[in-house]
Image (cartoon, grey):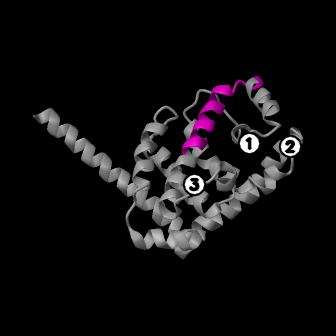
Amino acid sequence: MKNISKIKLNLVKEKLYTESLVNSLYEDIANYGEGESGVKVLMETILKEEKNKSIIEDIVDDFKLAPKFIFTFGTGIGAFYGPIQKLLDGSSVTMTEYEIYLLIVTAIATLINESDSSVLVDRIKEKGLYSSLTDVIEYIKNSKKVINSVTNNVLGTTYSLVDILGFTSLLVPSMKLMSDIISDYGVTSNTLSVMLKGVILSASVYGIKSIVKKIKNKIN
């Protein structure tokens, strides 16, 4: 009986923790760019964009990529950097900022079937970073699922990765939350999908109507 009670207690704790994460996710999206915390996140995003733009431009120039990678995906790439850097932090391979950005650009190019993706993947293989690329691709896929669980609940619709990359008000707060989860709870690439499964399910049935309505008005 003690074992059963302990299992039940752990399940309750997990449920409460997941609900807390989902509550934070919705509130961060609803308040993005508003109030002290929202403005802070917005300003941090703008500063990161300026800092990261030159690295992304270098990658675009080095691989002769179409300029749309900067104009279409610049903000998205910058938003992904923080959580992905933390996710890869425990890797045995030491990576520079350039290499992490290269992984993100390559993952995005691969997922959207960009014509230049094969060249990027070959370069990743040359650098011995292919296993990390797989982790980054899975991370981005899971991020898409988290965001679409919100949009499907709020609007009854889901978005492609290309759409999400340009959806700053959804992407940035979501990546901030996932970055916090990774750093605070020591999430690794092996445990990320399991960790987010509960978040995705809970986000799809989130019930605080006032916050859902605010997000709906903001997206529309």
Q: How much space separates mark 2 and mark 3, taking CA atoms?
A: 28 Å
Q: Residue furthest bottom?
A: 35
Disc number placed over residue 65 in the picture, else none? 2
3 relative position to 216: left or right: left
55 relative position to 188: left or right: right
Q: How much space separates mark 2 and mark 1, taking CA atoms?
A: 10 Å
The secondary structure that dominates the magenta segment is helix
- The residue sitting at 36% across, 55% down in the picture is 19
The magenta stretch spans residue 82: no
105 relative position to 36: left or right: right
Quadrant the N terminus occupies = top left
The residue under label 1 is which amino acid type? Val
Q: Residues within 10 Å of mark 2 (few under 14, many from 20)?
A: some
Between 147 and 189, the one lying in front of the other is 147
Residue 187: x and y, percent? Answer: 47, 39
The residue under label 3 is which amino acid type? Thr
- The residue sitting at 16% across, 33% down in the picture is 3
Residue 100: x and y, percent? Answer: 69, 39
Q: Which residue is mark 1?
A: 105
- Report helix, strand or loop for mark 2: loop
Disc number placed over residue 74 in the picture, else none? none
| Label 1 vs label 3, nearer the camera | 3
Query: Which span is picked out in magenta?
Result: 126-142
Sequence order check, earlier mark of 1 and 3? 1
Q: Residues within 10 Å of mark 1 (few under 14, many from 20)?
A: many
Q: Which residue is mark 3?
A: 158
The residue under label 2 is which amino acid type? Leu
- Report helix, strand or loop for mark 3: loop
- The residue sitting at 42% across, 56% down in the picture is 22
User: Is label 2 in contact with label 1 (beta carbons under 8 Å)?
Assistant: yes
Q: Residue furthest front?
A: 156
